[in-house]
Image (spheres, helix red, strand yellow):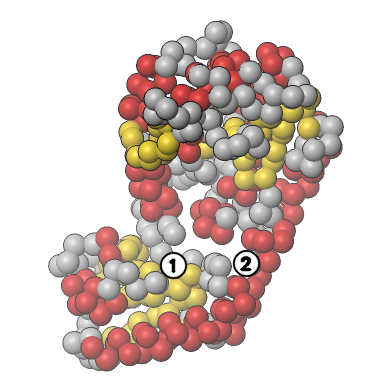
């Protein structure tokens, strides 16, 4: 998925959260869940109506974005094109015409074909999504990009299915065209295997800090401690430090709990039904915009909550938290990622992880 798609999706999803309202009948204490989607504004009103919107003190300076560093993007023409590192590119060649037309391409390949169609505009001098263009747009080059991520052991079968489908479809194009893979299928399969290994065995790791209570934290106190740091309750009924830049994941880090149901319903917090046994601060390392500095801020937030609530800091394995070792582990992992061509927070990392 291209960065543009991530941005658009983020704009939609960041304004939507899943809200769970529990109602009780007069004769039963069992909760009944009603699920609906609400805007962020509605969610803010929801916690405000429960008097859960005001922190007991302001410690929001902990979430200081000036401590973070992001890659600087040089100004350039916005272009969306196939990525040969994670996609198998098929060049589409015109044999009897001079230009490709959007309307005809959409009829040929459709908008939900399972692959991405890119077109190069001769007038604008750039690549873009054919499906995002006006129906009258024309192109001098067309590439079909087949995603190599998540193909796993079925890569050969899936890629062959795509080629069979494409060869069938091109017969219906008004002009005569041919398909020319940019590289052999065997190369694409090998890339797919390497991507799968990176995804599942090597770098798909989280940075996690657990604040563990001896029994359980008071739910209201835990909620207050989290909002004191400046964390926002929202998406997925979790607490987040949201990322307002266009680089990296939508959240710098999030807080959840291992106590059922795993998230924080404000109604249950208010009525005393939710008293978490732990608070889990975490983020997925490959998707992080600045993992090392975000880890430092996350640790500061966890320590603040520990000061307010008590409890013990643990690592992901449930062992006593060793700050120096955890920072060293994170630094080594990031170095290994970069040696494999994966930069945390980059478009490539977002697509793989």
Left or right: 302 in relation to 29: right
User: For mark 1, does the 10 Å Cα neighbourhood hold few (<14), some (14 to 19), or many (20 or more) residues?
Assistant: many
Left or right: 78 in relation to 250: left
Q: Which residue in the rendered view is the most extreme toward the front?
A: 27
The residue that label 1 is drawn on is 82
Q: In this view of the protein, can residue 69 be seen by the observer?
A: no
User: For mark 2, does the 10 Å Cα neighbourhood hold few (<14), some (14 to 19), or many (20 or more) residues?
Assistant: many
Find residue 196 and name its label.
none
Is residue 173 placed above or below 53 in the rendered structure?
A: below
Disc 1 element: loop
Image point (24%, 73%), residue name: 106
Is there a contact, CB below 8 Å, between mark 2 and mark 1?
no
Give residue 58's position: percent from left, percent from top.
55, 10
Image point (39%, 25%), residue name: 26
The residue that label 2 is drawn on is 195
Quick one: quadrant of the N terminus? bottom left
Is residue 140 placed above or below 294 in the rendered structure?
A: below
Image point (67%, 21%), residue name: 217
Q: Quadrant of residue 109?
A: bottom left
Image point (38%, 40%), residue name: 35
């Amino acid at each position: 998925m291209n960065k543009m798609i991530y941005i658009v999706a983020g704009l939609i999803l960041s304004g939507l959260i899943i809200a769970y309202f529990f109602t009780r009948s007069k004769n039963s204490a069992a909760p009944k869940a009603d699920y609906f989607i609400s805007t962020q504004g509605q969610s803010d009103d929801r916690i405000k109506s429960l008097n859960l919107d005001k922190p007991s003190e302001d410690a929001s300076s902990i979430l200081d974005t000036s401590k973070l560093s992001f890659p600087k993007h040089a100004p350039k023409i916005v272009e969306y094109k196939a990525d040969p590192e994670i996609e198998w590119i098929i060049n589409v060649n015109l044999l009897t015409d001079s230009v490709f037309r959007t309307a005809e391409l959409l009829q040929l390949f459709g908008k939900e074909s399972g692959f991405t169609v890119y077109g190069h505009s001769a007038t604008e001098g750039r690549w873009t999504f054919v499906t995002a263009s006006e129906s009258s747009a024309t192109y001098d080059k067309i590439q079909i990009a087949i995603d190599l991520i998540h193909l796993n052991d079925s890569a050969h079968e899936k890629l062959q299915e795509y080629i069979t489908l494409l060869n069938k479809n091109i017969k219906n194009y008004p002009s005569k065209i041919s398909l020319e893979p940019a590289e052999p299928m065997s190369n694409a399969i090998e890339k797919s295997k390497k991507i799968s290994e990176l995804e599942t065995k090597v770098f798909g790791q989280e940075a996690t800090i657990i604040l563990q209570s001896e029994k359980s934290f008071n739910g209201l106190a835990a909620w207050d401690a989290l909002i004191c740091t400046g964390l926002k309750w929202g998406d997925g009924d979790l607490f987040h430090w949201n990322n307002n830049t266009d680089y990296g994941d939508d959240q710098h880090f999030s807080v959840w709990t291992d106590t059922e149901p795993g998230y924080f319903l404000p109604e249950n917090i208010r009525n005393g039904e939710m008293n978490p046994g732990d608070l889990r601060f975490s983020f997925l390392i490959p998707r992080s915009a600045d993992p090392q500095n975000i880890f430092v801020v996350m640790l500061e937030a966890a320590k603040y909550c520990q000061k307010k609530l008590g409890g013990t800091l643990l690592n992901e394995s449930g062992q006593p938290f060793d700050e120096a070792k955890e920072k060293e582990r994170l630094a080594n992992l990031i170095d290994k990622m970069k040696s494999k061509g994966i930069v945390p927070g980059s478009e490539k990392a977002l697509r793989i992880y």
